[in-house]
Image: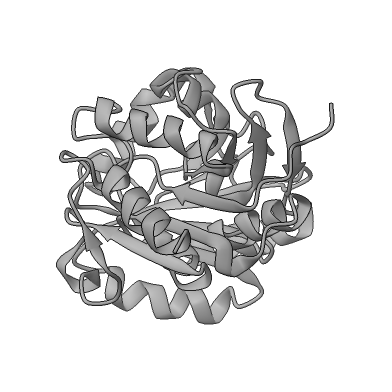
């Protein structure tokens, strides 16, 4: 099937941006996204969720054309869920990253390549880390403990460590220095809203690189792309696109960096789409 060439693109994060605090899509945001298609705008969700997690959350009930999964490790057409891009870590890269995570004594998970990256191995230190164990319990039927010593023979999509908010500022510079050849992304836990998830991917994986690849495929110029986000893992995308918006429920530390729109509970994506499209069509 030949893909339609759109003249512009709107990208939105999912949790905390497009979905409200109850995990629902508001009628206001749904109507705004539906109207964008009539205006010739390609609609994209860029999320940290895996395909399985997306299916459990919203199924095929989003009025969008593409989903950038797992921070850019995979891209699918939507709602058909046809995988059009997948990036993975080699076994050698996995071994190095696992070694560093274990040296730093982190609780972490090692995920299979897309599209089965809801399946993972895990390493638990035994320390008090409720958010880590909450995520482990949620995916317990897809999780297996990592062998000791670990033998890394297979590729992976990513590593994910759950870190206490009070220690993240000390750990992040160390991880970024020691894993300088990887993409190291910080995000606020969607489970407790406080803990920090540190995700390690191949260098080519990030939201803006995934969206950039898709835009090039669809022949859409960067300055014709707008994005809406709410957290640290959206920063690279918001800085890269032509126009970036931040919903009002974002961390206070980020609120001076981008134009603010209403929160995810009050139609922030719809407001961003209206403001951007009004300006774009002038």
The quarter of the displayed image where residue 266 is located: top left
* Residue 16: % across, % down: 27, 44
Q: Quadrant of the C terminus?
A: bottom left
Q: Where 36 falls versus 238 (above or below)?
A: above
* Residue 197: % across, % down: 37, 54
Seen from the viewer's position, the closer of residues 78 and 139 is 78
Residue at left offset 43%, top offset 22%: 140
In the orientation shown, which residue stands out farthest toward the front? 282
Residue at left offset 26%, top offset 32%: 28
* Residue 1: % across, % down: 84, 26
Q: Is residue 186 visible?
A: no
Seen from the viewer's position, the closer of residues 233 and 192 is 233
Q: Where 131 falls versus 239 (above or below)?
A: above
Q: Is residue 129 left or right of residue 140?
A: left
* Residue 194: % across, % down: 19, 52
Q: How many marks?
A: 0
Residue at left offset 76%, top offset 38%: 84
In the orientation shown, which residue stands out farthest toward the right? 1
Q: Is residue 177 visible?
A: yes
The quarter of the displayed image where residue 190 is located: top left
Residue at left offset 68%, top offset 55%: 215
Seen from the viewer's position, the closer of residues 140 and 224 is 224
Q: Is residue 121 left or right of residue 139?
A: right
Q: Where 259 falls versus 64 (above or below)?
A: below
Seen from the viewer's position, the closer of residues 251 and 183 is 251
Q: Where 238 falls versus 214 (above or below)?
A: below
Q: Is residue 120 left or right of residue 186?
A: right
């Amino acid at each position: 099937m030949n893909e339609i060439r759109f003249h512009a693109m709107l990208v939105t994060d999912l949790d905390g941006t497009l979905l409200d605090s109850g995990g629902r899509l508001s009628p206001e945001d749904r109507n705004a996204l539906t109207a964008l298609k009539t205006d010739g705008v390609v609609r994209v969700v860029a999320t940290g969720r895996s395909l399985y997690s997306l299916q459990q959350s919203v199924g095929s009930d989003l009025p969008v054309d593409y989903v950038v999964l797992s921070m850019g490790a995979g891209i699918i057409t939507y709602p058909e869920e046809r995988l059009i891009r997948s990036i993975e870590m080699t076994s050698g890269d996995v071994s190095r990253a696992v070694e560093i995570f274990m040296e730093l004594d982190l609780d972490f998970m090692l995920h299979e390549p897309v599209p089965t990256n809801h399946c993972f191995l895990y390493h638990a230190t035994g320390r008090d880390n409720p958010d880590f164990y909450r995520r482990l319990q949620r995916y317990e039927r897809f999780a297996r403990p990592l062998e000791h010593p670990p033998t890394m023979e297979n590729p992976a999509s990513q590593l994910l460590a759950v870190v206490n908010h009070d220690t993240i500022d000390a750990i992040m510079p160390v991880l970024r220095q020691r894993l300088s050849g990887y993409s190291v992304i910080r995000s606020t836990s969607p489970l407790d809203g406080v803990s920090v998830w540190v995700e390690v991917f191949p260098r080519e994986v990030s939201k803006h690189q995934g969206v950039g690849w898709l835009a090039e495929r669809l022949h859409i110029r960067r300055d014709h792309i707008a994005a809406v986000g709410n957290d640290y893992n959206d920063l690279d995308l918001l800085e890269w696109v032509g126009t970036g918006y931040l919903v009002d429920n974002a961390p206070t530390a980020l609120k001076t960096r981008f134009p603010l729109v209403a929160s995810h509970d009050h139609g922030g994506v719809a407001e961003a789409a209206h403001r951007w499209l009004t300006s774009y069509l002038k």
